[in-house]
Amino acid sequence: MSRVAVIGATGHVGTYLVPRLVRAGYDVVAASRGEREPYTPAAEWRAVERVRLDREAADAAERIAALGADVVIDMICFTPESAQQLVDALRPTRPLLVHCGTIWVHGAALRVPITEDEPRTAFGDYGVAKAEIEQLLLRETLAGGVPSVILHPGHITGPGWPVITPAGNLDPSTWHKLAHGEPLPLPDLGLGGKERRNLLVSKQSGEQGMVKRGNRHLATSDVEEHRFILSLQVDIQGEGVAASLGDQGRDT
């Protein structure tokens, strides 16, 4: 049985990813600061080894390496320095490292959906740091060090983190208006595009990034990078969303 360590295991993605890994037959270690329980309870958590760990602590990388995992899924690495510390600690045993990046490494999208081939024009401190982490991990893998899979999610939603609506805001009344066929003013004449993503894609992507090659590690020449977004571009006129709620978007 492969041993999997999930760092940041009780967050929005980890809450759903960890039970999936248990159901898939993995020996799971859930590392977190221990300040909260998962957002959604699940019986599978009773089979999980829980470890209290602060990702920013000076000894965090060494403690993660000491878990002896075959796969490390890092959901909460936000600086190149933190990534380098973890890679250095993992290099002697070379487990597969699955890193959660961000679609922000591409900056403002010129077209959607964004693919792996799009240029890097990272935006903001968060996006720039994630782009630097990406390059660090790619260099490490190509040099024959710790093999990595990098997942670049788009918009993550979940309990306490509302989804951005077709109107480009966080107002839940938008969904009510769409569901009841009420007029909905939209920016940019409703012609802007959005890339949509949810926790179902999140939890599946974390698992797929680890298991798509079975239980073997990536070869030292392999570099994997993925964007986990829905392939369908949704026009913010709300046609796709309204249709899913049993109505058709219409011009007003």
Image (cartoon, rainbow, N blue to C red):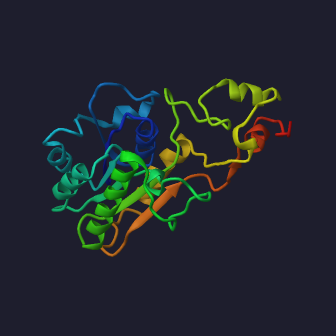
Residue ID at (56%, 42%) = 198
Instruction: Give the quarter of the figure containing the C terminus.
Output: top right
Place of residue 15 in the rendered image (x, y in percent of width and height, measured from the top left): 43, 35
Place of residue 31 in the rendered image (x, y in percent of width and height, measured from the top left): 28, 38
Q: Nearer the viewer, residue 252 or 157?
A: 252
Q: Is residue 218 above or below residue 132?
A: below
**Farthest residue toward the bottom?**
221
Q: Nearer the viewer, residue 120 or 50?
A: 120
The reply, left or right, for residue 14 in relation to residue 63 is right
**Farthest residue toward the front?**
188
Place of residue 163 in the rendered image (x, y in percent of width and height, measured from the top left): 58, 34
Q: Quadrant of residue 22?
A: top left
Place of residue 1 in the rendered image (x, y in percent of width and height, measured from the top left): 32, 53
Q: Quadrant of residue 33?
A: top left
Q: Is residue 223 above or below residue 89?
A: below
- The image shows a total of numbered marks equal to 0
Q: Nearer the viewer, residue 144 or 251?
A: 251
The reply, left or right, for residue 239 in relation to residue 67 is right
The reply, left or right, for residue 161 in relation to residue 98 is right
Q: Nearer the viewer, residue 131 or 29?
A: 131
Residue ID at (45%, 59%) = 121
The reply, left or right, for residue 79 in relation to residue 59 is right
Residue ID at (81%, 26%) = 180
